[in-house]
Amino acid sequence: MSPLIHSLRQAAIDWRLVLMSFVLLLIALIFGVLSDGIFLSPENLYNIAQQTAVVGIVSAVAVLVIVARHIDLSVGSVMGFVGVLMATLMYTFNWSWPAAILAGLAVAIAAAIYQGALTAMMGVPSFVVTLGGLMSFRGAAFLVADGKTQPVNDPFFQRLGGGFDGAIGTTASWVIAALMSAALLWSVISKRNAKTRYGIPNNPAWLDALTFLVPALVIIGFAAAMNSYRIGSKDAPQGVPIPVLIWAGVAFTLSFLVHHTRFGRYVFAMGGNPDAAALVGIPVKRVTLMLFGLMGILIAIAAIVSIARLNAGTNSLGTSMELYVIAAAVIGGTALAGGSGSILGSVLGALIMQSIDSGMLLLDVSIGWRYVIIGQVLIAAVVFDVLYRRYTGDTT
Amino acid sequence: MSTPLVELRNIHKAFGGVRAVDNVSLNLYPGEVVAVLGHNGAGKSTLMKMLAGAYPIDSGDVLVNGAKVSIKSPVDSQRIGIESIYQTLALADNLDAVANLFLGRELLTRWNTLDDHRMDAEARKVFERLNKNFKNVRIPVRRLSGGQRQVVAISRAIYFNARILIMDEPTAALGPEETAMVGNLVRQLKSDGVGIFLISHDMPDVFALSDRLAVMKNGALVGTYRTRDVTEEEVLGMIIGGRRPEGKIQTETLDQSATV
């Protein structure tokens, strides 16, 4: 084996993610050519990014639920319920937005814990519990405001959903991009130092340089694209949309949980071998409950972004979102059998799906064909997953 | 007479109406290997799993160094110094060797996050003691060989300084070289004073490694004998027919002359 291949094999790089990044790039380029460059315009990229945020936020945590061998079909309904509730509290009951957010958060966590407890404590399959939740919470979303649409008028709250005033401007975008790149550099360097200190073999320097440079360039490139998009009637360019910033924060936090906390490690251990997890003394029930609780928190965040983007809470908010959430996780390489998946994968999966959908919309593909094609993309992703696992010997 | 390391007294366990373990008493002394034998379903694994905290005990007492202990969970068992190596290996296949070694007992930094580099370095030291060629410690253990996986499982016992070790078919999935490695390890742990319960179907293993053997059938104990007092045929007779060999003394408590 050549030293190059050897060092690539030893390095802890997720090749599937690298490959998916190329797939996303390829999709963007193809649509860019087909649409005479409109697809790659800052305006379109801005819209794709903010449209993907809600599904992306929920999908990031759905990855963990699926990794732990559970499923949550109720995410769209719970989001609709909590979204309408927050909008109603603000519009009909004149609550301030922080109070409404806190109430929504509490209700979302309660709903998630209720379903989590049935799953973790009673051993009812999460598929059944959340299938019931899918129907019940959709009904609850109707009951909250008797099916009436609840407008969201608070200008600050509206900004959380992106859109006209929902971006942070150029300076803040540059600063955040620079800070994220610096944090990335620091993490790569401190990892190298720690490995040297403990005498653990390091990746070759050029490989670590790439693991810093590529994401840093993507971040800075994204900030540059967002900073070059100016809405016609405004003086200043938009910068990074707030929902995308929230999504990035969610993805970063969850990645941290996965890689640096016991909770994250236990979720993966439970998915890899539930019996082993119990035998080594992992508190399986508690971790499952915490996982569902985390899902509740992120559904509340997604609900906030959603009603802020639509400027209203409606009883149909989030309808069939569970399908997109699960599809994004699966396209992102999460195995439904449990035990494997990544947060970054869900980000890429959500972007791939939204890019294909938006790209076809730009090309005037009819709604029927769009559904047909998106469905087949999902299947293609799973076929790829099966072949990839067969090739690497990771059959589960 | 010295105090046994472990005393199991009148242990009962039923699953539904089935008596999986029926009034079994068994001792284990420091530096001793006791083989636990029997058919599949004889109750030996269930008995050991109760000691490991995986199943609750219906009735009966467990004494460690003469003091009664309460084992309600795997964590309780580990705290007493009991480690188990299961037939199924109890590894999370999707995690790497380092993560598996520390699973459930991760080393943490002062911010309560995983101290990955320290675990990595510590793990490499333990693995190296057992197998010098074991270097790919950061890939999922499902891609490792049976021997390497066994190294990971055994490392869990060694790293956390087990006083009492339960080995459930430790050589079932291994080649000759790796079986020899396990044998050497058992002898080394014995000389360190670790007491070992060995569940095995492999008669050469049993006769090579154990000091005493206990045979179970249908949940009950047939008898406990010094390994050198009985023949393979007599042992098979106990396992299959539940017949005690004639004229052989049972050694439910190990007398001084039997200690090594």
Image (cartoon, rainbow, N blue to C red):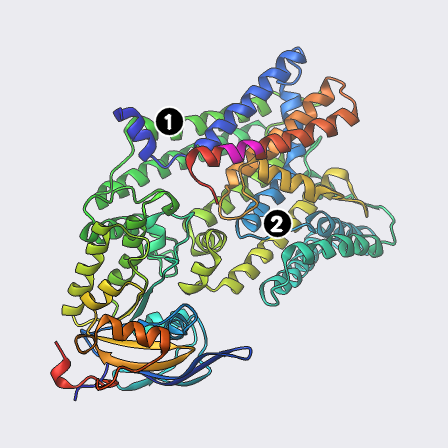
Vertical position of residue A31 compared to residue B122: above or below = above
Helix, strand or loop for disc 2: helix
Magenta span: predominant SS is helix
Residue A236 or A274: which is nearer the viewer? A274
Q: Image point 67% across, 27% down: which residue?
A: A47
Vertical position of residue A271 compared to residue B21: above or below = above
**Residue type marked 1:** Leu
Q: Which mark is residue A210?
A: 1
Q: Quadrant of residue A51?
A: top right
Letter of the chain that mark 1 sits on in the rendering:
A
Q: CA distance from mark 2 to mark 1?
A: 32 Å
Vertical position of residue B50 compared to residue A84: above or below = below
Label 1 packing within 10 angstroms: few (<14), some (14-19), many (20+): few
Upstream in the sequence, badge 2 or badge 1? 1
Q: Position of residue A301 (x, y in %)?
A: 64, 48
Q: In the rendered structure, are the residues bearing label 2 and label 1 in contact, judged by CB atoms less than 8 Å apart?
A: no
Inspect the magenta stretch and tell me whether residue A384 lies in it: yes
Figure quadrant of the C terminus of chain B? bottom left
In this rendering, does residue A167 appear at all?
no
Residue that carries the numbered disc 2 in the rendered image = A298
User: Left or right: where does residue A214 sit relative to residue A121?
Assistant: left
Q: Image point 57% across, 47% down: which residue?
A: A61
User: Left or right: where does residue B190 sit relative to residue A386?
Assistant: left
Residue B10 or A10: which is nearer the viewer? B10
Inspect the magenta stretch and tell me whether residue B231 lies in it: no
Letter of the chain that mark 2 sits on in the rendering:
A
Q: Which mark is residue A243?
A: none
Q: Position of residue A31 (x, y in %)?
A: 64, 17
Q: Which residues are magenta?
A: A383-387
Q: Position of residue A344 (x, y in %)?
A: 51, 37
